[in-house]
Image: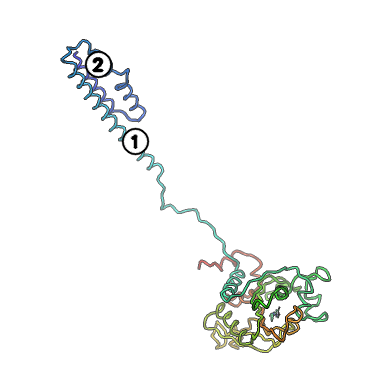
Amino acid sequence: MSLKEQLTELKEQGLTQIAEVQDLKALNDIRVNFLGKKGPITEVLRGMRNVEPAERPIIGSFANVIRDELTAAIAAKKEELEKAALAQQLAAETIDITLPGVPVKSGQPHIIAQVIDQIEKLFLSMGFQVVDGPEVEEDHYNFEMLNLPKDHPARDMQDTFYITKQLLMRTQTSPVQARTMEKHDFSKGPLKMISPGKVYRRDSDDATHSHQFHQVEGLVIDKHITMADLKGTLELVAKTVFGEEREIRLRPSYFPFTEPSCEVDVSCFKCSGKGCSVCKQTGWIEVLGAGMVHPNVLRLVGVDPEVYGGFAFGLGPDRFAMLKYGVDDIRNFYLNDLRVLQQFSQKG
Ligand code: 2NL
């Protein structure tokens, strides 16, 4: 067989093997076998010694053409196999996005926290500070500083959790305000604050009483504060929590720490004032207590009542939530039954 014939046969063999090969490893073996230094093409070319010198360049370039053809066929096959491998991998790794996912359970703030958050947002927007304080409080700050003399009925052992003679669970958040007023430098400007938090009463729990509940107290101390400032502020609270159409009215009342004192009613959000079971046919619902800070309280914290005055109020987020959502038993807020709490999802 002539060299040309041998080379042509090698080419045919090579092309057949390349056409049949199924994987990249075997393809590489073919490449090494045919085109490598010890491969048959190199071997055939060694036989050039016996070829006429004039023939040699022709055989040489014929061999190169065959080498190039096989190289090209291998490259094409390599690309084909790589594409097939990628397609197979992609098919195997396909994610079915129509499959239902694993649901993620998300919580939400407790309904009382939601009411407090809403009130905090309102007061922060009016430049008030939100102040925290201890729940275990001194008798001095809880009562004494708030003009509750030693024999006042509110200080009765029956109503307060005493820890020692001097220490107790705070019955209101006003001690936070007494502490803040005491520290405030009034030459630097007015004091505008709210103090939200937990308070404690030595009560038997029932539908409307809980030994632990919540309070948000508010306080503004400055020169020239009037009851109109109080009314305007509380009207905003009522509208924010109970709806834009609400009105408020002030009725005279009594608290040891304010003078004058008032109770604040909001126009009924159920019947808009016509009279229904929620407002007991009066058109009004009592929602909070307030007043002008008693001069004795100012004196006790070192503020001159001849120069400064202010208003204060106290409201119950528990009562707000009960009224707003028609919850008739305060214990629902503290039993932490998810069937109750999940009804107050903010996701709507
Ligand atoms: C309520 C309503 C009220 C205050 C709280 C207060 C605080 C300071 C000075 C004066 Cl530091 N007053 N707080 C005022 C009026 C009402 O809470 O029903 N309380 C028993």
Q: Secondary structure at mark 1?
A: helix
Q: Dot 2: what SS?
A: helix
Q: Quadrant of residue 334?
A: bottom right
Question: If the picture is divided into quarters, which one holds ligand 1?
Answer: bottom right
Placement of 338 over or under 191, stated as above or below: above
State the CA–CA distance, disc 2 to disc 1.
Answer: 33 Å
Front residue of 251/309: it is 309
Number of the front mark, 2 or 1: 2
- The numbered mark at residue 163 is none
Most extreme residue toward the top is 50
Residue 127: x %, y % from top left: 59, 75
Amino acid on which the number 2 mark rests in the picture: Leu
Identify which amino acid the numbered label 1 is placed on: Glu
Q: Along the line of sight, which residue is nearer the eye, 26 or 298?
A: 298
**Residue under numbered circle 2:** 45
Q: Closest to the observer: 146 or 6?
A: 146
Q: Is residue 336 left or right of residue 179?
A: left
Does residue 210 sit above or below 285 in this rendering?
above
Where residue 324 sits: x, y (%)?
A: 58, 77
In percent of width and height, residue 268 lies at 57, 84
- The residue carrying mark 1 is 82
Which quarter of the figure has residue 70?
Answer: top left
